[in-house]
Amino acid sequence: MTLLFAVDESADRQHHFHVGVLATGEQAAAAERDLNAVAQRALELGYNDGWSPAPELHGAEIFSGKNGWGELQFDQRFEIVEAALDVLEAHGIEVIARGIQLARFDQRYNKDKAFLHQIAFRNLLERLCERLKQRDELALVIADDHYSRSLMREDVRRAKTLRTPGYRGTNFNSILDTVHFVDSADSRLVQLADLVAYVRRRRQSIPTEAHPNAETAMSRIDARVIAAVPDPTGQFNTVYYA
């Protein structure tokens, strides 16, 4: 069976995360229907950016109250995030997360952001291929559009013939075709990956929220994400230089 692996990223000054959600076609279709309903619920609660007929479920904007999300109260925005993440368990969609601790990474490599994105994305795909081997499946990778997409595609092309550099030395033959980059506004599955990436990155950088209500909500939200990781303490939920 061919699976879909939708990827997005989230970063702050401490961590950078690439996250993918792994689903069958049927699971992806069901998730899209449910996420469309979540977006409709946001409109009913008062979301209004002045022009969008249906909001993009973008983690940073929802949590910060930007671009129409400021019309919703704090607890309403968390309601939207929880409802969106409920599709993970509801449809058996898996999460694979790979983070990088930026200060230690920069100390070692002292490279530009393009190199960081290349390494982070490659690391995530290595773990994807490990999971696909466990499941005896193939996958098509769909990612949010990115200025480093040529480097990312080159990595996939080379790793299909050879292997990725480093001690993991992974072959990417279980990845079909190339990496397909899309505008996240057009893909609910990529938006789901964005929400998961935001939650994983924020929870790593801020293990405990300052406000008790925020901490209660984030604890519930992160639990939904962790429950969707095939092995939460293993290679599918890791941080480089933790």
Image (tube, rainbow, N blue to C red):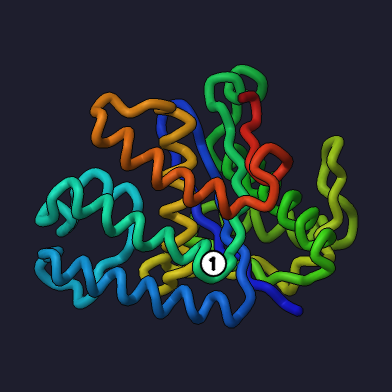
Q: What is the count of numbered marks? A: 1
Q: Position of residue 178 (x, y in %)?
A: 69, 69
Q: In which quarter of the image is the C terminus?
A: top right
When asked about the image quadrant of residue 50, the answer is: bottom left
Q: Where is residue 75 in the image (x, y as percent from the top left)?
A: 20, 48
Rendered residue at 90%/55% (across/down): 162
Neighbour tally class for label 1: few under 14, some 14-19, many 20 plus, Cα within 10 Å:
some
Rendered residue at 46%/26% (across/down): 14
Residue 38 appears left or right of 14 = left
Viewer-proximal residue, 208 or 99?
A: 208
Rendered residue at 26%/29% (across/down): 212
When asked about the image quadrant of residue 48, the answer is: bottom left
Mark 1 element type: strand
Q: Where is residue 120 in the image (x, y as percent from the top left)?
A: 62, 42
Position of 180 relative to 29 (above/below): above
Please state which amino acid type lies under the numbered disc 1.
Answer: Phe
Viewer-proximal residue, 158 or 51?
A: 51
Q: Where is residue 96 in the image (x, y as percent from the top left)?
A: 62, 51
Residue 191 appears left or right of 101 = left
Q: Quadrant of the N terminus?
A: bottom right
Rendered residue at 53%/20% (across/down): 103
Viewer-proximal residue, 29 or 5?
A: 29
Q: Mark 1 points at which residue?
A: 181
Q: Which residue lies furthest to the right in this view?
A: 162
